[in-house]
Image: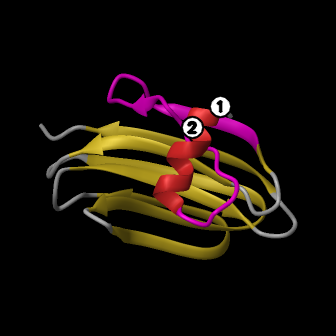
Amino acid sequence: MSHVARAICALVFGAVPLCACTAALITADAPKKVVGHPLPPYELHEECVELKPGDRLEYTFESTEPVDFNIHFHEGNAVAMPVVREKSRADAGVYAPRVAHHYCLMWEAGAAGAAIDYQIRLRPAP
């Protein structure tokens, strides 16, 4: 990860020492499927997308070890997490935002680390 990306992660996540921020956003014409993404102990991985009311974000993931997962957005100095799954090996769902924001799906490994498979698809409002 670049020094600039680390600095941005430090600003966003405060005391979290390691972070794997993703630069490319997911769009309706670019769904994302990842297999075996390594997540070292206590590290984070994010995938971000712009959402507005009426959009649907389909997601699914599986992990070799339990991970903390959330979907979040920033509102001023606060972080809102409409979806939170702690110590999960898998989850799937469809998230429908109530407000337009830049949303991020985030996985955080525990002491054992993990490898994650995930799929994310944006279904824009009609």
Q: What residue type is labelled 2?
A: Ala
Query: What residue sits 61% from the left and 45% below the top?
Result: 118
As rendered, which of 12 and 38 lies closer to the eye?
12
| Secondary structure, magenta segment, majority class | loop
Element type at mark 2: helix
Image quarter (top left, top right, bottom left or bottom right) of the N terminus: top right
Place residue 22 in its image quadrant: top right
Q: Which mark is residue 122?
A: none
For the residues labelled 1 and 2, the Cα–Cα distance comes to: 5 Å
What is the quadrant of the C terminus in the image?
A: top left
Q: Does the magenta stretch include residue 17?
A: yes
Seen in the image, is 95 located left or right of residue 6? left
Q: Do the residues labelled 1 and 2 touch (CB within 8 Å)?
A: yes
Q: Where is mark 2, residue-wise?
A: 5
**Residue 59: x percent and y percent?**
47, 51
- Find residue 69 and report its horizontal and vertical position in percent: 57, 65
Q: Position of residue 67 (x, y in %)?
A: 69, 66
Query: On the image, numbered disc 1 is attached to which residue?
Result: 2
Q: Residue furthest right?
A: 112
Where is residue 112? Give x, y as percent. Answer: 87, 66
Horizontally, residue 15 falls left or right of residue 55, namely right
Which amino acid, mark 1? Ser
Magenta residue span: 14-37
46 displayed left or right of 36: left
